[in-house]
Image (cartoon, rainbow, N blue to C red):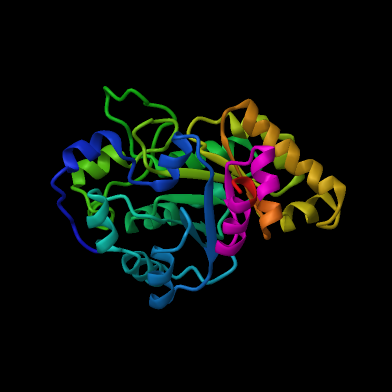
Amino acid sequence: MAALIVFPNLAAARQSVHLNPVVAKLEAGEIVYGLSTQDLSLSHAREVARARADFMYVDMEHSPMDFAALRTFLLAMGDKETLLAKGNAQPDVALLARFAPPPDESEWVVKQALDLGLYGIIFNGVDTPEQAAFAVSTMRYPQLRDSRYPEPRGIRGSSPGNAAWAWGVSVAEYRRRADLWPLNPDGDLLAVMMIESEEGMRNLDAIAATPGVGALFPGAGGDLSLSLGVTQDSPELEEAFQRILAACVRHDVACAISANTGEDVARRVREGWRIIRTTVRAADEGRAILDP
């Protein structure tokens, strides 16, 4: 959002509406559909803002880490007409991003990304619970003495002005909401851990059990298959996917996966995956198969 918008029923919305549509749907037990891109053009931002999806994640692991372009893209996604029709500040499509540094070297990247107003970070190559805990800490502000959720300790520096502007809320309201869900039920930030190695597979349960982790994500499987020493069509890779899903279920954490066709989307939803990275067409086809 490019401006602070005041809604007549915002006081009620503050109590009942998550600003992050991904969090809102996960909390309601619904399936979340998302897209990914490296295209940060203004025209694409406008298209994305009204896409039939719940999130867009910008891949800056495999494209330039251009924060100026990311800021422009985020602001261009601000769809005031849709917000006014809703009567609250929740966008239809949340913007997340994935970055190049490993999670234990990403503090400055996370700080800059969240200060732009992103709704979540996808941490690539999470291999240990210690890396997951550090990633969580980079997304949290240090908590007040009377915080109901004091741990894990936050290390995010305080400069919320731009993020509050992008979210369309006051600084005080942003501070209240800028915490990790489901650790904090009122939080609107999502921390996603990508499992891409044999070491990550060995530590699945410990990573999933880390407070503040919102989802696990094996991505498209390219890095994971290479780490396992198998091809992407190998049964061993599918077995790894199912192990990740089982860990998510055991620890009540959302599980994300990529699906490229309607049949794939429907199959993954039936298996229990709650976040599907796909295309608009495949998502529509998958929904039609699931609910003919």
Q: Quadrant of residue 118?
A: bottom left
> Which residues make up the magenta segment?
266-288
Q: Residue at x 63, y 30 (%)?
A: 249
Q: Tell me: 34 left or right of 272.
A: left
Q: Tell me: 99 left or right of 263.
A: left
Q: Is residue 237 above or below residue 16?
A: below
Total labels drawn: 0
Between 186 and 85, which is closer to the camera in this rendering? 85
Q: Quadrant of residue 187?
A: top left
* Image location (x, y in percent) of residue 155: 38, 40
Q: Examine the residues drawn in magenta and state their main secondary structure.
A: helix
Between 168 and 149, which is closer to the camera in this rendering? 168
Q: Residue furthest front?
A: 292
Can you say which quadrant of the picture contains the N terminus? bottom left
Query: Residue 275 colored magenta?
Result: yes
* Image location (x, y in percent) of residue 124: 60, 52
Between 133 and 212, which is closer to the camera in this rendering? 212
Q: Residue at x 56, y 33 (%)?
A: 253
Q: Tell me: 124 left or right of 84.
A: right
* Image location (x, y in percent) of residue 135: 50, 43
Q: Residue at x 20, y 36 (%)?
A: 12
Query: Residue 255 colored magenta?
Result: no
* Image location (x, y in percent) of residue 236: 85, 46
Q: Tell me: 246 left or right of 72.
A: right
Q: Is residue 201 visible?
A: yes
Between 66 and 185, which is closer to the camera in this rendering? 185
Q: Is residue 162 visible?
A: no
